[in-house]
């Protein structure tokens, strides 16, 4: 049986998409050439090397302090990002994902 490696991805204080990908790059030890987009995330979770197999994603239900009045768009992007993790968990079973919502 494979050893469990827990990784917490804390998106709660992120205000820019680049900060979200920096959090994943640092915690999951992504290669520098992995792109900062949802397609690259899917590629990472389904075949490229990364660190971790038990993920906790920390985030609010909805973001409120995103610059340029982009609260709704940022929240929707994080929803999509979480969906990529959950889809990879469901389809491949090599990771577990827990989403922890903050008030």
Image (tube, helix red, strand yellow):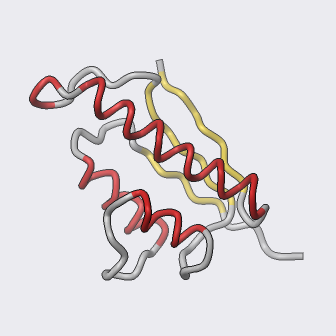
Percent of width and height locating residue 102: 49, 25
Spot occupied by residue 2 in the image (x, y as percentages of width and height)? 82, 76
Q: Position of residue 75 (x, y in %)?
A: 36, 30
Quarter of the image for residue 78 reads: top left
Give the residue drawn at x 24%, y 55%. 18
With 70 as the anchor, is 101 left or right in this view?
right
Q: Is residue 71 above or below residue 99?
A: above
Question: What residue is rendered at 31% in x and 63% in y?
Answer: 36
Q: Quadrant of the N terminus?
A: bottom right
Say if 78 sits above or below 26 in the image.
above
Identify the image quadrant of residue 73. Answer: top left
Give residue 86's position: percent from left, percent from top.
Answer: 64, 48
Q: Nearer the viewer, residue 103 or 36?
A: 36
62 is higher (above) or lower (below) than 19: above
| Residue 102 left/right relative to 12 | right
Farthest-out residue, left: 68
Residue at x 33% of width, y 25% of height:
63
The number of numbered badges drawn on the structure is 0
Q: Nearer the viewer, residue 56 or 87?
A: 87
Judge by depth and name the residue closer to the eye, 63 or 36.
36
Does residue 94 lie above or below 90 as drawn? below
Name the residue located 42 percent from the left edge and 68 percent from the top edge. Answer: 40
């Amino acid at each position: 049986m494979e050893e469990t490696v827990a990784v917490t991805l804390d998106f709660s204080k992120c205000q820019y998409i680049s900060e979200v990908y920096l959090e994943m790059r640092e915690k999951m030890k992504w290669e520098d050439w992995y792109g900062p987009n949802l397609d690259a995330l899917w590629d990472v979770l389904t075949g490229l090397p990364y660190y971790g197999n038990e993920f906790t994603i920390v985030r609010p239900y909805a973001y409120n302090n995103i610059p340029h009045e982009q609260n709704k768009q940022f929240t929707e992007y994080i929803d999509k990002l979480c969906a990529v993790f959950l889809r990879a968990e469901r389809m491949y079973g090599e990771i577990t994902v827990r989403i922890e919502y903050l008030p």
